[in-house]
Amino acid sequence: MASASIILPRKLGEKLKEKAAETGYLPDELGVELLRKSLNEELDPEDLIEQYQALSEKYLTEAKELLKEGDLAQASEKLWGAAALAIKMVAAKRGLKLEQHGGLWVFVNMLAKESGDKDFTRFFGEANALHRNFYENEMEKESVETILEDIEKLITKLRGV
């Protein structure tokens, strides 16, 4: 997937993050959605799948770097984002678009039931603990590192679905 980077003025970047938090999107995901709408463009399902996969991989890489730097709150949010986007990728493969946080849970529970693999639910629960840690910043580095391992397992499982 060809990609382009956009550098936003700080004010717009902050506004994008606020709006993303309000709407349940990740900032990069919301940016693409807003741009798509303003250009009156539709993404075909394959484009959406590629976008989710590329963003998930990007967030996972960024999370590992932030963890090395000791920024546990930001690393936590990136790990949650990597997991959420991998879930959205699988949903997109099935022709679904998950736009609300609760929709992620419904879909993860469905995957767990279909496969008989409770790790989908367990690992996404850990991802949600990281999402909470972004706001509360209460976890120690070792906890985030341990959950990182499970997030990687979740993403691997999702790629196989």
Image: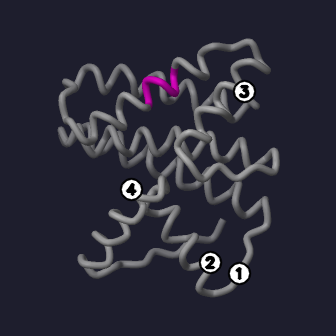
Q: How many angstroms separate mark 2 from mark 1 (CA)?
A: 5 Å
| Magenta-colored stretch includes residue 78 | no
17 and 44: which one is in front?
Answer: 17
Q: Residue at x 63, y 13 (%)?
A: 118
Q: Amino acid at mark 2?
A: Arg
The residue tagged 1 is 41
Residue 110 coordinates in the image, percent (x, y): 72, 27
Mark toward the start of the polypeptide (2 vs 3): 2
- Image height check: is 124 above or below 82? above
Magenta stretch, main secondary structure class: helix
Q: Which residue is mark 4?
A: 21
Residue underneath mark 3: 110
On screen, residue 43 above or below 116 = below
Please state if 43 lies on the left or on the right of 99 as rendered.
right
| Disc 2/disc 4 C-alpha distance (Å) | 19 Å
* Residue stretch rendered in magenta on the structure: 123-127
Label 1, label 4: how far apart the Cα atoms are: 24 Å
Residue that badge 2 annotates: 36
